[in-house]
Image (cartoon, rainbow, N blue to C red):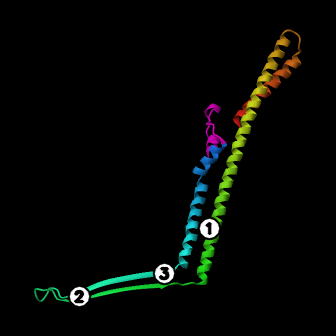
Amino acid sequence: MIIAIVAVLPLAAADIPVITLDEALRSAAENNISIKSAEVTLNRSIRNADNAMGAFMPDLRLSAGLQAGGNFPPATEAPAYTGLTLNAGASASFSFSGSMIKDGETRALDREDAILTFQNDTKSIEQLIITAYWTIAANKIQADNASTLAEDAKTQYESTLAMYNSGISDELALNQAELAYNQAMLTVKTAEDT
């Protein structure tokens, strides 16, 4: 993602932020939408696989109740209670079917697929970042080498020009030195634009 920004923005070489490969990889892991989407899918699949285990758990139910009886409004000044009832109950049920096993297996496979997709997306983005990073580094080295060769060609041209002006060198040597210098400057411009 960072490398794409660097490639799109027309910045001078001095304006381009310098980051390490580790920083580029960390930034991609934190900001890449494909990785975030794969991570969400992975987490959902893990929860679904974990939830599948709930189907194999027994269903437990507890109940309790208390009831008091009486007349309201009381017929006499003293309330007349007719009774007190307390009840409690518990039940447990367990069901098991072939579709439950199939559902659990499907969820487990979905989980494995999500893990592989996440790993694949992460590795793909990582490979793209590494390739782009080293391409940029190679282009910078190429531009630096072209600048060094251009400086050498300029020095050679100035030397040949001085020898031509003093009569030591001929016009052909001067033209060759000038051509070499112009080609070196073109190479520098091409390397800087890459």
Q: Residue 122, image x and y in percent?
A: 65, 55
Q: Quadrant of the C terminus?
A: top right
Which of the numbered marks, if any, corresponds to residue 69? 2
Question: Local crowd at mark 2 within 10 Å, few (<14), some, or many (≥20)?
Answer: few
Quarter of the figure with residue 101: bottom right
- Of marks 1 and 2, the one in the foreground: 2
The label shown at residue 59 is: 3
Q: Is residue 135 above or below residue 103?
A: above
Evaluate whether residue 192 shows in this view: yes
Q: Is residue 54 above or below residue 190?
A: below
User: Between 85 and 153, which is closer to the camera in this rendering?
Assistant: 85
Mark 1 Cα-neighbour bin, 10 Å: few <14, some 14–19, many ≥20:
many
Could you say which quadrant of the image residue 39 lies in? Answer: bottom right
Question: Viewer-nearest of labels 1 and 3?
Answer: 3
Kind of residue at badge 1? Arg
Residue found at x 58% / y 80%: 100
**Which label is found at residue 189?**
none
Mark nearer the N terminus (1 vs 2): 2
Distance (Cα) linking label 1 and label 3: 26 Å
Q: Is residue 28 above or below residue 20?
A: below
